[in-house]
Image (cartoon, coloured by chain):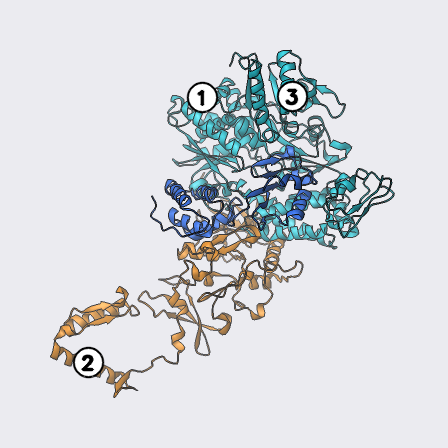
Chain colours: A orange, B cyan, C blue
Amino acid sequence: MNKPNIIVINGQEYLFTPGETILTVARRNNVDIPTLCHMKNATPTGACRMCVVEVQGARSLMAACTVPAGPNMVVRTESELIAKARRMIIELMLTSGNHEDCLVCPATGDCRLQELAYKYQIKAGRFPKTKSRYDLEAVNPFIIRNFSKCLACGRCVQACNEVQVNTAIDFGYRGARTKIITKGDRTLKDSDCVFCGECIQVCPVGALIPKDAYKKARICDTKSVRSTCTYCGVGCQVNLHVKNNEVQHITGRGDAAPNFGSLCVKGRFGFDFIAAKERLKTPLIKENGAFREASWDEAIGLVAERLSAIKAKHGADSLGVLTSARISNEENYVVQKFARAVLKTNNVDHCARL
Amino acid sequence: MSKNRIQLMLCGGTGCHSTGSKKFEKALQQELEAKGLAEEIKIVETGCNGFCAVGPVMLVQPEGIFYQKLKVEDVPYLVEEHFLKGRPVKKFFFVEQKNKATIPHMNDIPFFSNQVYRAMRNKGVIDPEVIDEYIAREGYFGAAKALNEMTPEQVVEQIKISQLRGRGGAGFPTGMKWAFAAASPGEEKYVLCNADEGDPGAFMDRSILESDPHAVLEGMIIAARAINARQGYIYCRTEYQLAIRRLDIAIRQAKEYGLLGENILGSGFSFNIDIYQGAGAFVCGEETALMRSIEGKRGMPRPRPPFPAHKGLWDKPTILNNVETLANIPQIIIKGGAWYASIGTEKSKGTKVFALSGDVNNIGLVEVPMGLPIRKLIYDIGGGIPGGKKFKAVQLGGPSGGCIPEHKLDTPIDYEEITKVGAIMGSGGAIVMDENTCMVDMARFFMDFIQDESCGKCTPCREGTRRMLELLEKICHGEGQDGDIQSLEALAEVIGQSALCGLGQTAANPVLSTLRFFREEYETHIKEKVCPAKRCVALLKFEVNPEMCKKCGLCFKACPSEAIAWKKKEVAVIDKSKCVKCMSCFDKCKFDAIF
Amino acid sequence: MSILTRPSHPDITDAMWDKIDEIIDANKDIAGSVIGVLRMSQDAVGYLPVELIDYIAEGMNLPASQVYGVATFYALFSLKPKGRNIIKACTGTACYVKGIKEILSHITNKHGIKEGETTADRRFSLEGVRCLGACGLAPVMIVSENIHGNLKPDEVVGILENYK
């Protein structure tokens, strides 16, 4: 029974490793299958049904994201029937809430549904727009939940439960009343949510958006600059979305260690300081009760002079060093070395102990 | 079994309970005691007899006299006449609707005489709460044989030979399902019984569990032996409290007798069964959703493959069989697969249980051989349509099924044949509809049900059925437009092709089936804004046609809101400002004069 | 016994909390038992207030969001208090064919409640339920555990008069 691991997609033979889905094999070989709910690093759920394909011998269309490739399986990824199904699914999504205000939606240009509707040229209209059963939730810090745009694809639930493992949200109710809920269906701010924003990043539409999204440029209007998060020593890789030399949004880079796309609340939302007017750009030296700007050489010289003087007068243990989580392990090591070898004190501590 | 002169097999099914069988039993017992007959005449409360329409019912054994529609006040007369004087009481005999003939013996009543009992062989014959009565009728012989005389492979082989197919609806060959699970590697495996009977109009499983719970347990033990499982669950609707209670008693007794638990019948094989109560979600009848529910989660189906035979409950190899399927198993093991396959059609063997209801004279539970024409089911067993009305359609398979009209009534009961006419065998709900049923409204009813029961996971089912319901509601409200039928068909095709689970894929069947046979009724609703069956309230005028009105005043008496003015020998007039559109007058009018 | 802090809730007495703790203790180590725990807790309290769902989640060591998701998925669970008399009108096909719609509209006209609603005085809750499997008696309703079958539209209001 040693069948060769070959699957036929659109008449072309491809090798696969047992366990791989049709979608994985297709993508690796540059065969395009549209998806919406499918998410890397999470269990495929087969919820949205965008990725339906024809599998020879099957009674109905199959979701490429969930069906494992099998020996001698014959798959078609485009046909009249498939197009019909995908077009109808897009149409159903488009009319399932408020998806007609793309002109003023923060997600425009970064919206999977918009992309798909464009690709298949679907206009809403046959069916009346259904009103959302649930009101927009804007009371939270950092996150706005716009249920009228939610497609119940479940990506946010997976991001919260499988990626971040915060278990703050889940599916609630059922059928057409389905809603992404927190404990007791409270607002995010009254739930177990820690506002890491992972859900915003995976939301394929504008149902989850940053609180200040309306005041910022849309992601599609920004330039993406790769950087490293400055908050702690983990070194998360981020994309700074920049416009007019100002950071508008920060997202995690999915393709790079150590975070593979995930960020914490600070890394994702805490970037106001970059453009803050109060931000210090040079060292300040206090003289006669007032600060004045100084050069780094001058400032460091002053500090060295004062430290030496205190040490000479009161002994090494009158000094102590407190380091920060915002610098790297290597830098923390150096600071500790500085305290012990240069200042000759063991009074070293770190803010993360607080 | 006893030294009693007479045994009174009083039906204790839910249907008879609700028509007062408990009170009747108490009164009867008191009367028997008062007359000094309690020693020689014993009342046995059985499970569902099946003939729910005429409950409470009682079978007098060994004579075989069948009494129906019994009332507490009749007790003294009945005891006096029959049990003292030996004269069976004609008053309580069954009356044939066609020719008004009274039939004293149960076996002569067409409702019973046309049936073949296999899954329901013990119904009404044993006390379901006494294991000895089950054992006396070859109970647990099958389990003993499977455990001590057969290898698991031989058990699977016999089930394969029997060609038994899943009675839950889809008709997947049971033997094949078992073979897959048996071949799946793994120490931990599960046998599940699907008793989450959810199709509206279906009560087969409940009746079997109430009347013969041990048969299901025995079926599960044999299944466990076949795939080498240690643990079984019966997933039962929480609404079925009587069934759950009887199962509970049955499991306890089976454990006491060493038929469940460690080292069953000294075979070295151990198996346990627990009852798991569902919490009201139709979708949990779908196998993967049912397993999620047992795991304590939302009952949302997951994609297959992997199939449960490989990865089921707790990701372990699992088989799930329906109640009726399992109740057939012990007999197959005792008598052999070939015996089971001796009746039926080429691809559908054995019998099928139906819950016959709706506009039919003999409502109740029936078991018929495969291959029987549906017409016989409705007219011979069901006794035809009451009130001289015309037959319109019979709905098979519930929300996943379809309607079979008059000209297809000779279709035999067979999985493939029924599918050909656009319905499905289903779990056994057979709802008969007379000419007063609006087929658009029926389709709307099923879509409403599906929409309410959709788990909401996949787009086609969640959003698509909502759209279909909207369109059907529009049509029923007289707002249908050109193109609505085409939209319905387009939605139906996509939902059928792309929904995630079986529930979604079949959700549009009731619409497709009614469109196939009753398309003109849709068109009349849309184009003429008329509901020919007079069921769609929005399309009714609530006026009296003076030419048809026979001035009888029945509508006047029926109106709860005093909206109808009527005097003797005058045509009734409806005051629309007072009318609450409750339809009472429509139901009462015998002359079709209100429109 | 459980060491959880009981939230105060007007509809849950100390005796009920004791019962709930007992239920949780008996089930918390059994995988998949949360649906049963919710059912038994609802039997004890009459419905499932949100605070109770949170409490059960904590006791069962499950995410509260997940337990809320389960409680709102299944029709058996009610998060709102119910009336003294619960009218369960069967909306199965047989009952539908035999006119449960008219029965419901009579109840709605008389008591002003639709399916899923409770009268202001909490005398009645009206529920449309899935097939009760008593198709032989269609149309059927259950009022406070009593089955009323073969209902006629003009009788239903009178039947309900017996329930105060």
**Percent x, y for residue A216?**
48, 73
Q: SS of the residue at dot 2?
A: helix
Residue B260 disc label: none
Q: In the figure, A164 relative to B114: above or below?
A: below
Label 2 packing within 10 angstroms: few (<14), some (14-19), many (20+): few
- Indicate the quadrant containing the C terminus of chain C: top left, top right, bottom left or bottom right: top right
Q: Residue at x 60, y 35 (%)?
A: C147
Q: Quadrant of residue A335?
A: bottom left
Q: Residue at x 54, y 29 (%)?
A: B210
Label 3 packing within 10 angstroms: few (<14), some (14-19), many (20+): many
**Three-letter code, disc 2:** Ala
Q: Circle 1 sits on which residue?
A: B144
Residue A304 disc label: 2
Subunit ID for the residue under disc 3: B
Q: Nearer the viewer, residue A18 or B145?
A: B145
Q: CA distance from mark 3 to mark 2?
A: 109 Å
**Three-letter code, disc 3:** Tyr
- Discs 1, 3: same chain: yes
**Percent x, y for residue C1?**
33, 43
**Three-letter code, disc 1:** Ala
- Discs 1, 2: same chain: no
